[in-house]
Image (cartoon, helix red, strand yellow):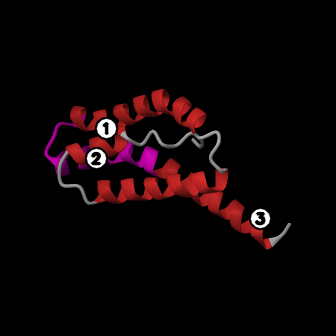
């Protein structure tokens, strides 16, 4: 296989790892997130629930709407949006910004 294929495969694997990690790491940090944002653990848990509902409802629509977009460009745009959303959440100071970010992360039609 050529070097180009290895680079593409590594990029996809790194992206899948990053997406999977950010999805599941919040569960382990739920108590810390709740205390940092000064909300209850139950309310902080709605970040995870909201994300799951958004993925379940939005993913099929995004997959259908993105059918005519070139796949490489589409993946690059999605990863840029994903990275921006993570940066916004990392520097958020209130409950509402992460909630908005997790609620709007329906832009991923593929992956875990």
Task: Give the class, few, some or many, for how many residues have Cα within 10 Å of label 3's Cα (few <14, many ≥20).
Answer: few
Q: What are the residue bounds of the magenta stretch?
A: 22-41
Residue 60 x, y percent position in the rendering? 55, 30
How far, Cα to Cα, is label 2 from label 1? Answer: 7 Å
Mark 1, residue position: 47
Residue that mark 2 sits on: 98
Residue at image coords 37%, 46%: 26
Q: Which residue is found at the position 83% from the left and 70% from the top? A: 2
Whether 109 is drawn above or below 4: the answer is above
Of the residues under marks 2 and 3, which one precedes in the sequence?
3
* Residue 37 horizontal/vertical position (percent): 17, 48
* Residue labelled with disc 3: 5
Query: Which residue lies at the image location 30% right of the left edge and 53% below the top edge?
Result: 89
Left or right of 4, for residue 89: left
**Given contact means CB atoms under 8 Å apart, are the residues at marks 2 and 1 in contact?**
yes
Main secondary-structure element of the magenta-colored stretch: helix
Residue 80 lies in the magenta stretch: no
Nearer to us in this view, 84 or 13: 84
Q: Which marked residue is nearer to the observer: mark 3 or mark 1?
A: 3
Q: Earlier in the sequence, mark 2 or mark 1?
A: 1
For label 3, the SS is helix
The C terminus: image quadrant: top right
Residue 63: image quadrant is top right
Q: Earlier in the sequence, mark 3 or mark 1?
A: 3
């Amino acid at each position: 296989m050529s070097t180009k294929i290895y680079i593409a495969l590594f990029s996809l694997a790194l992206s899948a790892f990053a997406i999977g990690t950010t999805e599941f790491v919040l569960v382990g940090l739920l108590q810390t997130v709740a205390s940092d944002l000064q909300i209850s653990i139950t309310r902080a848990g709605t970040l995870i629930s909201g994300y799951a509902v958004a993925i379940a409802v939005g993913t099929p629509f995004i997959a259908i709407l993105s059918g005519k977009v070139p796949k490489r460009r589409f993946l690059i745009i999605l990863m840029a949006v994903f990275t921006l959303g993570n940066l916004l959440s990392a520097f958020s100071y209130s409950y509402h910004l992460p909630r908005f970010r997790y609620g709007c992360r329906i832009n991923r039609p593929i992956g875990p």
